[in-house]
Amino acid sequence: MSEQEKSGTHYAVHWQEEDYYYPPAEFVGQANMTDPKVFERFSLDNFPECFKEMADLLDWDQYWHTTLDTSDAPCWKWFVGGKLNASYNCVDRHLAKFKNKTAIHFVPEPENEPIMHMTYQELYRRVNETAAVLRDFCGLKAGDRVTLHLPMTPELPITMLACARLGVIHSQVFAGFSGQACGERIWDSESRVLITMDGYYRNGKLLDHKSIGDTAVDVAAKLGQQVDKVLVWQRYPGKYSSSASMIEGRDYFMNDLLKTYARTYVKPVSMPAEGILFLMYTSGSTGRPKGVQHSIGGYLSYVAYMSKVIQDIHPEDVYWCMADIGWITGHSFIVYGPLAIAASTVIYEGVPTYPDAGRVWRIAEELDVNIFHTSPTAIRQLRKAGPDEPAKYNYKFKHMTTVGEPIEPEVWKWYYNVVGKGKAAIVDTWWQTETGGFLCSTVPALAPMKPGSAGPGVPGIHPVIFDDEGNEIPAGSGKAGNICIRNPWPGLMQTIWKDRDRYVSTYFGKYNKNPESKDWRDWPYMAGDAAVMAADGYVRILGRVDDVINVAGHRLGTKEIESAALTVEEVAEAAVIAAKDEIKGTVPDLYVSLKPGYEPSQELVAKISGAVATVVGKIARPNKVYIVPDMPKTRSGKIMRRILASISNRTDVGDVTSLSNPEVVEHIRKQVQG
């Protein structure tokens, strides 16, 4: 069985191509990009100078002299010699025209709390005051790293933009991650300051968040990284919403510190384009999380362009991306991209179905949202919880995005017909933490939509599908392979923080023929996703080819989950596989075998599940934990995860005769399937 078949990608060839859906004339008439020549301008013949079109959306303190520097291939440097500041580009430059316009609509989860509308002028004031605290109280300067462990409240973008103003590199850890996971990221990024919040709402409960930060600081200290200061934003200023005590000399309330710096102006630090804007940790196929490092000039120009051309955001639109800022989607398409082009961006604190399935559509109606951006998992959840709810509310979307995982054609059609009322253009986008912004999608006014297909490469992106030997698989052949991008682009990560070798081997190692080459043509970027390209160039993504599970659009490393299970004393071996799930797409099923002398029990199942939630975070809690007598293994002792995946997904396990213990397969099958 080939690697592609093991990863489930061979299902692709049986899928039917769907019909085209065309964008409404009303949408095309107002769109930001209606010029079909855009693809000509961004052809490989015009590479790399074509990317000037993206960079020209920004204000530069100093223009660049080299669009693309390939001297340290494949660590590309964009707009070299250029200088700018990301905070200035997202806030200050809009004041002349838009100071009284809403920059952020903050929707608290409790419906009895009013929606907060923060103007660009107020955002400017708050970013400056926060930057003053970071600079003058914490002593932070350009190049320092700060870990943020903040939930979905305005304090998160304010803190990010305050860091960017100083050239300080922020590393935001998803609020749902555990203290252990946060502590490891503090250690890896060498942060001396942690910025957190006392509590936030999720599913009707005010969660105690500060205590998780305390654990993170302890974990970082054990690994050798000392945190000097913990800054705590208060969910309710002046009131403390955590049971964890504040530690004298280390913990400080931001709300108190800010009083000292009221109305302070902090001059934006002019940073080199190839300086680092942020680190975003993503799960890898080995245990240690990867600090994906994004640049200032390249990344910001890319997400600004994608927000304008693919998201079609105009300054007068109300735009709501329902992702979490703790993931790359939120960085690129709640904060940096939309604010760079003077959007009004919505931040919602809580769960889409709280207190009921109508919540999202009530928010859309109240704020008159006209661009809506969410994941297939959220769409499946909303469809299941309230399939008829959208019809009850009077909102009108002109444009809808889907992101984070492939969307099934049936779910796409519900999104189009019911949520979009048949009147919105949909962009089904494919991209990754590492890529900064979209790679494949239709330009909404230029190309028709096709349910289940992300679409062709966006302007400036040239996808290709290779087989394992590096031969190009022609479009329309119906065969799946590894999707790669032929060329570099400004949104691509610069490297993995402190691990260049891992960056090169993970993303370029497979198809690079000459490690010494400085020619970008020799370095196709390998995404690690399997895909099939239709005759029209539209790409359908089929899932990961490595040991990463995409749960509800969140990438979780199987090694991280397995390592967490192995922290339980009774567990000898652990294997995680991706099980299909009608809501989340895939969920982790965890198989464990025990050390001699221990017996399976429900208590032990709960203990193992709890260990994963504690070490990695609740998002990674296994769907099912199966305690099995032994793992199916090759003669060399390798656990055959594909067999476990077949059992969980009720597909044919194939030939097991070459295993060292073939009899265990039937035992596990009966245990799981009954």
Image: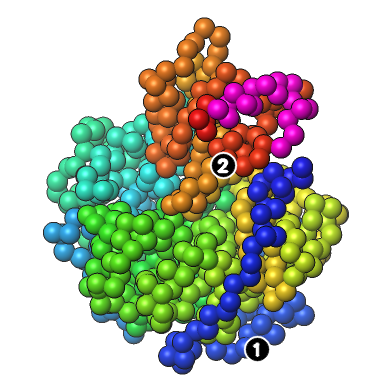
In this orientation, does residue 151 appear? yes
Say which of 157 and 388 sits in front.
388
Say which of 120 and 330 sits in front.
330
Q: Name the residue under label 2.
A: 649
Q: What residue type is labelled 1?
A: Lys
Q: Mark 1 points at which residue?
A: 37
The label on residue 159 is none
Ranked by sequence position, the earlier of labels 1 and 2 is: 1
**Residue 488 shown left or right of residue 235 in the figure:** right
Q: Position of residue 558 (x, y in %)?
A: 57, 37
Secondary structure beneath dot 1 equals loop
**Residue 68 shown left or right of residue 27 in the figure:** right
665 in magenta: yes
In the image as oriented, which residue stretches furthest toward the front? 674
User: Residue visible at 74% across and 64% down?
Assistant: 478
211 in magenta: no
User: Residue visible at 28% across and 39% down?
Assistant: 210
Quarter assignment of residue 502: top right
User: Residue visible at 33% across and 36% down?
Assistant: 212
In this orientation, does residue 157 appear? no
Q: Where is residue 669 in the image (x, y as percent from the top left)?
A: 58, 30
User: Residue visible at 41% across and 79% down?
Assistant: 422
Say which of 409 and 312 sits in front.
409
Say which of 395 and 175 sits in front.
395
Mark 1 or 2: the one toward you: 2
- Magenta-drawn segment: 654-670
Q: Position of residue 256 (x, y in %)?
A: 20, 49
Spatial separation of the CA atoms under disc 1 and disc 2 = 46 Å
Q: What residue type is labelled 2?
A: Asn
**Colour theme:** rainbow
